[in-house]
Image (cartoon, helix red, strand yellow):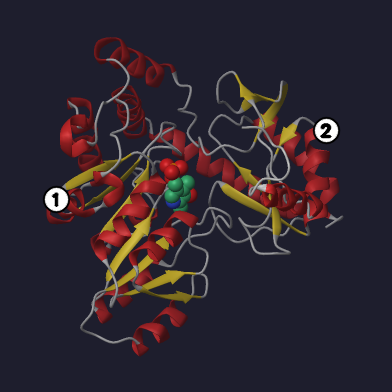
Amino acid sequence: MSDTSGSPLDWLRESLQQLEQGGLRRDLRVRSGPQRARAMLDAREFVHFGANDYLDLAADRRVVEAACGVASESGWGSGASPLISGHTEHHKKLADALARFERVDAALLFASGFAANAGTIPALVGPGDSIFADQKNHASLIDGCRLSGASIKIYRHADANHLESLLSQSTEGSKRLIVTDSLFSMDGDFAPLAELADLRARYGCMLLIDEAHATGVFGAEGRGVAEMMDVEEAIDIKIGTLSKALGASGGFVCGRQSLIDYLANRARTYIFSTSPPAPAVAAAAAALQIVEQEPQRRETLRLAARTLRRKLSKAGWQITDSESQIIPLRVGSIDRVLSLGNRCAEDGLFIPAIRPPSVPDGECLLRLSLCYGHGERMLERLIESLSPLATET
Ligand SMILES: *Cc1c(COP(=O)(O)O)cnc(C)c1O
């Protein structure tokens, strides 16, 4: 059907115009060729700071070969949801490998990290229960919380004291669940996991963390921020994605056996959604093996992140005190962030301009996602372009 007027959908065009006028309309860029540190976007080559492919595995030959091998043996589609017949030997192999990697009893694979969050939280708590959520949680955690029907109490970002005051006012007896990103996707900072672990113990609540941006990157063995902060024993429910540092697609939940068995019976986004294609699962398994066997990837990346943060700071940018590969450059207004984004693009650098609804009004930022494949020369170019812009914000 075409976009003619006089239809009940006319309001759509008006809403789009409003987005456009406010500088908030988003349009799709087309990427061609492989996902790498240098990539083609809308037919132009950029040094690419807009991907979550932190370890450069999305186009890794071994990952691609694993997918192709399984595709030619077993085909593409999985044919059904996991509980019916879509759980193939490849799915089982990856779930077992993830459980071993994470040093937990078991893991459950979802079609995406978003689905993992949207299914897990409502399976664990419901009306009459309480959720305590960080103010800056990822949209998929927020939606999972809303879907649950539990009462949602939001604590100030990374503020364990505020969380404690909310916990102390809450009633015992019903289930209580703390929900947080471990590495926040916009600010690039960490949740105070040691304090949260302490509150979990003192108040007897469940603790769920989402390691989407940290899996493969933090911790000596790459299990994430909980490993790095040495609090893994206190994590009841851990969410990860296969779609960021693992360069593939899909999400997972891991923990004790009873948790996984329960979620397989109760998480609606697991039960009522087709199992991801076996070749995609095999690609993630190959990537996981690389994460285990090549710790130098995450070590190099973390070192590069520290160096880049220091240099940007020296150039006059206000850089928050974190060590992560996600580096937000705080800009403020929508006009400003769009104009700086365009200036960078003219210099051949792609840095996404982050605007509402991803950040609150007036807190727009350029978000640098640093990847293993960004060599020294690319980073020098980045500093050269960004230095003169720092004083303009
Ligand atoms: C990206 C992201 C997700 C969603 O994962 P997908 O696999 O892309 O659906 C979930 N949680 C957080 C914190 C994320 O950043």
Residue at the image point whose x is 27% and y is 51% from the top: 268
Residue type indicated by callout 2: Glu
Residue 260 appears left or right of 224? left
Q: Which residue is mark 1?
A: 261
State left or right for residue 298 relative to residue 237. Answer: right
What element does badge 1 sit on?
Answer: helix
Residue 231 visible in the shown view: no
Residue 117, percent across and down?
36, 53
Q: Is residue 3 above or below residue 226?
A: above
Q: Is residue 235 visible?
A: yes
Which amino acid type corresponds to the residue marked 1 in the rendered image? Asp
Which of the pair 173/366 is nearer the observer? 173
Label 2: which residue? Answer: 346
> Does the Cβ of the disc 2 residue fall within 8 Å of ligand 1?
no
Above or below: residue 85 compared with residue 143: above
- Viewport quadrant of the N terminus: top right
Q: Is mark 1 within 8 Å of ligand 1?
A: no
Direction bottom: furthest residue = 169
* Residue depicted at 36% across the width and 33% down the height: 291
Coordinates of residue 175 in the picture (x, y in percent): 24, 75
Pointer 2 local density, CA inside 10 Å: few below 14, some 14–19, many at least 20: few
- Distance from disc 1 to disc 2, alpha carbons, whole Å, reads 52 Å
